[in-house]
Image (tube, rainbow, N blue to C red):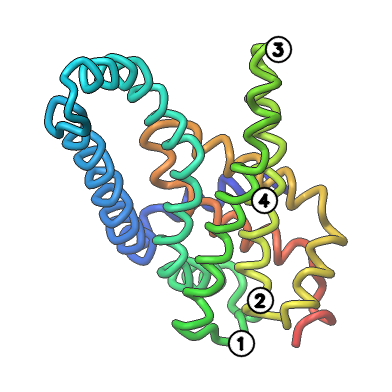
């Protein structure tokens, strides 16, 4: 089911709604990270004298010289899924509508989600991803000694988080929140596997820009495969 849902999502990438959301969301996300890179660059000690002693500024510059690149890579690793989900989440209604119009015309969402609720859902999704990964930092550091431990933890943790959040993003358009969560728990294995595919996409450069769109489209198929018509409201 997951492979089929993923392939269907990829096949629909040429849909005008998909292209529109991609360019809007990717543009905003890229601009934000470009601004963050510029801020980090201009905040270097060579550009700003943080202390009155030259030797201290030089020492800080030396430390940051080693820390800035890996630090920024880690920041991208943790923040990109959350921020891309936040910005593209504002436009994912169009993706869900496009998938349901093409594949599930008789089962389209009966509940429209307003701008305010969409913003709250996207913000909650992003905040959850960021906060949980920050809380897991001590475990990431401990697992550094196992070589692949941090990667496995990242995959497991974010497969659960992204699967849960993307499934509920689709489900709340058909059900009340508590019912959406109940259905998600009943199909937790499929949701987790779908979340794993989304997580892997976020880890691959350039493909990570497509991850929120493909993830949402795929989750529409997972959602419709997980329910029967008697569950709809």
Give residue 114's position: percent from left, percent from top. 49, 85
Distance of mark 3 from mark 1, alpha carbons?
47 Å
Question: Would you name the residue on which mark 3 appears?
Answer: 146
Considering the numbered disc 1 on the image, is that residue within a helix, a strand or a loop? loop
Marks 4 and 1 in Cβ contact (< 8 Å) = no
Considering the numbered disc 2 on the image, is that residue within a helix, a strand or a loop? loop
Question: What residue lies at 28% left-to-right and 14% top-to-bottom?
Answer: 62
Marks 2 and 3 in Cβ contact (< 8 Å) = no
Mark nearer the N terminus (2 vs 3): 3
Question: What residue lies at 65% left-to-right and 12% top-to-bottom?
Answer: 147
Choose mark 2 or mark 3, whichever is in front: 3
Picture disc at residue 111: 1
Snapshot quadrant of residue 49: top left
Question: Would you name the residue on which mark 4 appears?
Answer: 161
The residue most toward the left is 47
Snapshot quadrant of residue 61: top left
Mark nearer the N terminus (2 vs 1): 1
Distance of mark 4 from mark 1, alpha carbons?
24 Å
Mark nearer the N terminus (3 vs 4): 3
Marks 3 and 1 in Cβ contact (< 8 Å) = no
Marks 2 and 1 in Cβ contact (< 8 Å) = yes
Distance of mark 4 from mark 2, alpha carbons?
16 Å
Question: What residue lies at 70% left-to-right and 20% top-to-bottom?
Answer: 143
Check the image and report above or below for 12 versus 53. below
Picture disc at residue 185: none
Choose mark 4 or mark 1, whichever is in front: 4
Q: On the rendered image, what quadrant is the C terminus found in?
A: bottom right
Q: Residues within 10 Å of mark 2 (few under 14, many from 20)?
A: some
Q: Residues within 10 Å of mark 4 (few under 14, many from 20)?
A: many
Distance of mark 2 from mark 1, alpha carbons?
8 Å
Distance of mark 2 from mark 3, alpha carbons?
40 Å
Q: Nearer the viewer, residue 164 or 144?
A: 144
């Amino acid at each position: 089911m997951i492979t089929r849902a993923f392939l269907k999502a990829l096949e629909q990438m040429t849909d005008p709604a998909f292209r529109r959301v991609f360019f809007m969301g990717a543009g905003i996300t890229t601009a934000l990270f470009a601004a963050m890179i510029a801020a980090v660059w201009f905040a270097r000690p060579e550009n700003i004298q943080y202390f009155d002693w030259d030797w201290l500024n030089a020492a800080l510059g030396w430390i940051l010289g080693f820390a800035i690149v890996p630090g920024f890579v880690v920041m991208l690793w943790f923040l990109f899924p959350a921020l891309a989900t936040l910005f593209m989440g504002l436009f994912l209604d169009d993706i869900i509508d496009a998938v349901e119009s093409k594949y599930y015309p008789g089962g389209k969402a009966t509940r429209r989600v307003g701008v305010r609720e969409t913003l709250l859902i996207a913000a909650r999704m992003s905040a959850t991803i960021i906060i949980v990964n920050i809380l897991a930092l001590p475990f990431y550091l401990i697992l550094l000694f196992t070589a692949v431990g941090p990667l496995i933890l990242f995959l497991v943790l974010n497969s659960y988080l992204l699967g849960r959040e993307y499934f509920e993003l689709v489900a709340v358009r058909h059900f009340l929140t508590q019912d959406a969560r109940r259905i998600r728990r009943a199909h937790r294995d499929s949701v987790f596997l779908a979340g794993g595919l989304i997580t892997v996409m976020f880890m691959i450069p350039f493909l990570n820009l497509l991850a929120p769109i493909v993830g949402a489209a795929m989750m529409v198929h997972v959602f419709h495969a997980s329910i029967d018509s008697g569950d709809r409201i």
